[in-house]
Amino acid sequence: MTYNIKAWISSLAGLCLLGLSHVAPGADKTIWQGESGGLKILWTSEDIIATKGGKVLFSAKALARKDFEVEFLNSESESDSECNYERTFTLLSVVGTIASIKDMSYQYCRGAIRPLVNIQFTTV
């Protein structure tokens, strides 16, 4: 199987996010970081990470990598189709100790009748 991976993170952040902390672009490509109710959010061009008490509760990059490996790299499929796979995470809001994240994946393989699209929402 051949897969073209286009993994990127996009996001929408409401004005409430801007009120939690300052926007801090820098050498590490930090887009935004803040803390609310002990929940720390670090949003970079590569990942969205939520931690509490030093423990990582959510990492968009780690989740995407794990799911991709399970679904495609470790697959027993005999298919030789060329496929495109894209996964997008969007930080929707942070309120108190709860962060809401939209997770959308798109997959299209040559010869398929239609693409597969999956949208799910996660709260951390």
Image (spheres, helix red, strand yellow):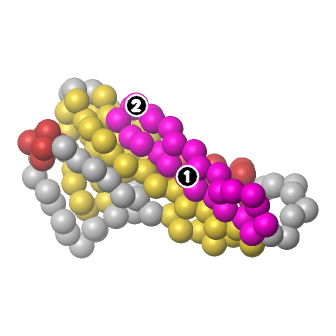
Q: Position of residue 24 (x, y in %)?
A: 15, 60
Is residue 108 shown in magenta?
yes
In the figure, residue 47 lies in which quadrant? bottom left
Local secondary structure at mark 1? strand
User: Label for residue 123?
Assistant: 2
Upstream in the sequence, badge 2 or badge 1?
1
User: Which stretch appears magenta?
Assistant: 100-124
Q: Position of residue 120 (x, y in %)?
A: 50, 38
Relative depth, front residue between 111 and 39: 111
**Cα gap from disc 2 to disc 1, whole angstroms:** 17 Å
Task: Say if 76 sits above or below 100 in the image.
Answer: below
Q: Residue at x 46, y 55 (%)?
A: 88
- For badge 2, the amino acid type reads Thr
Local secondary structure at mark 2? strand
In the figure, residue 58 lies in which quadrant? top left
Structural crowding at the residue carrying mark 2, measured as other residues with C-alpha within 10 Å and reported as few (<14), some (14–19) or many (≥20):
few
Q: Is residue 69 visible?
A: no
Q: Residue at x 69, y 56 (%)?
A: 114
Relative depth, front residue between 65 and 106: 106
Q: Is residue 85 visible?
A: yes
- For badge 1, the amino acid type reads Ser
User: Label for residue 105?
Assistant: 1
Is residue 50 shown in magenta?
no
- Give the main secondary structure, helix, strand or loop, of the magenta stretch: strand
For the N terminus, the image quarter is bottom right
